[in-house]
Image: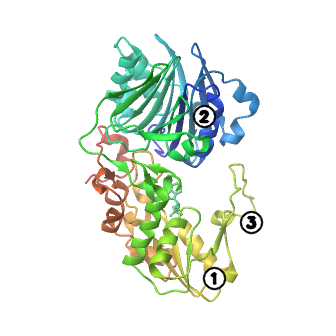
Amino acid sequence: MSRLFHNIREECGVFGIYGHAEAANHAYLGLYALQHRGQEGAGICSSDGNSLYLEKAMGHVSEVFSEKRLKRLPGMAAIGHNRYSTAGGSHLKNVQPLMVNFSLGSLAIAHNGNLTNAFALKTQLEKEGAIFQSNSDSEVIVHLIAHSREETAQDKIIDAVNQIKGAFSLLILREKELYAVRDPHGVRPLSIGLLGDAFVAASETCALDLIGATYIRDVEPGEMVRICDNGIDSIKINPAKKKAHCVFEFIYFSRPDSNIFGGVNVHTVRKELGRQLALESYQDADVVIPVPDSGVPATLGYANESGIPLDFGLVRNHYIGRTFIEPKQSIRHFGVKIKLNPVRQILQGKRVVVVDDSIVRGTTSKKIIKMIRETGQAKEIHMRISSPSTIGPCFYGIDTPTRGELIASTHMTDEIRKFITADSLAYLSMEGLRSVIPNPDDYCYACFTKHYPITFPQEEQYSQLELSFV
Ligand code: AMP
């Protein structure tokens, strides 16, 4: 889900389970496995067959849920949500699941993705008397369901889903049923699994693994899956002619142990991206090091292909948490130093290839190279990026800044090299990326090409972001 209007920057994780005596506890574990998809807030809504119960708060899953709190979530069904942390403006009211009462009972939703027509829908709904409590586009879905003139809850949901555009992997919980819905292009992942007799739905399969569920299949693009006491039903709503899975899920966002978009393993793809990168831009060097953690699989591929030894020249602190407070006065601007520290024994006097998955603003690479040169005392630093230049903002749910802030949208590669102070810099080519991705035509590459597969009905909503449509 994303916030409306400004700062369209959110990624999220969703998890649902139906037909298990410990539904909320499993949702808690599922969210734990999906923590990387969102760290700002977390929530779980459960159903005991008669009523829905909701607990949510700001913070990591482990901070939000105590044993006591989980006990307040009874029943055999639950959905959960992790919300991504955004720059400023974070409020509990935006944390999901969102729960409402409407004419046919209660309903809760958990949404991953980003609607492209939320502004128009919200404006229309407000004209019709809807009062919005959050500034999240996911609330639009709730109002559309509540306002629908269809008779049954299922038809109301279908009616709502047919009106929204953009990216959505959606879980909807009612007293006696759970819906899992995926947008027509299948932008964000959503998989279904089985845990004993219970059905499970999760953004990524790493959540199924944690609770011991078996992966069955993905929710298909444009499909709505309904789970109730009688089992599972599939309702085809509106699949698009062309799929547009988010390629950035492979490059950066999903966990490497997850299998997404039809069961493709993320680690394997990342490793192949690194191998392809080495084929395209080999650099004679003494050592190749990853920017941990997301750069690790690509570095492995790069090292295997190039024959240059891999080592871990940067060590990451995994315990930074959201409560970190940067000292105000003398030792400001820790930046990347809080997260990463170079190992001089590995880097000193060496020609080093550094592999990262992406350059967005360029500030991370610049700081990393500075520390590898100054603290690590490396002789040469060659930056290799396992994706093409990021030139277009994402409007479908990945946190990328506005176009003006994307360094590659306004600078040539050599200018970026100078900015980050590397001895050389190379990105993976688009052809190289496509050669690694299975069924490459089924993907959205808009962040690298500015070819946006899902259109924007309200250009004015995005004009402030200096988007140039291609
Ligand atoms: P930047 O300093 O803006 O160039 O950020 C690049 C770094 O951020 C790389 O190390 C990436 O692994 C990481 N990164 C890329 N995309 C995202 C994202 N959507 N959210 C958080 N970090 C990201």
Do callouts 3 and 1 mark residues in contact (Cβ within 8 Å)?
no
Q: Residues within 10 Å of mark 3 (few under 14, many from 20)?
A: few
Q: Secondary structure at mark 2?
A: helix
Q: Dot 2 corresponds to which residue? A: 27
Look at 43% across and 22% down and name the residue there: 143
Q: Residue 417 or 150: which is nearer the viewer?
A: 150
Q: Residue 153 or 115: which is nearer the viewer?
A: 153
Asked whether the viewer can see residue 38, the reply is no
What label sits on residue 274 in the rendered view? none
Amino acid type, callout 2: Ala
Q: Is residue 46 left or right of residue 12?
A: right
Question: Which tag is nearer the camera, tag 1 or tag 2?
Answer: 2
Q: Dot 3 corresponds to which residue? A: 331
Amino acid type, callout 1: Leu
Amino acid type, callout 3: Ile
Some atom of ligand 1 lies within 8 Å of the CB belonging to the residue at label 3: no
Q: Residue 210 or 457: which is nearer the viewer?
A: 210
Give the alpha-carbon distance from disc 3 to disc 2, as whole Å. 41 Å
Q: Residues within 10 Å of mark 2 (few under 14, many from 20)?
A: many
Q: Quadrant of the C terminus?
A: bottom left
Q: Dot 1 corresponds to which residue? A: 347
Do callouts 3 and 2 mark residues in contact (Cβ within 8 Å)?
no
Do callouts 1 and 2 mark residues in contact (Cβ within 8 Å)?
no
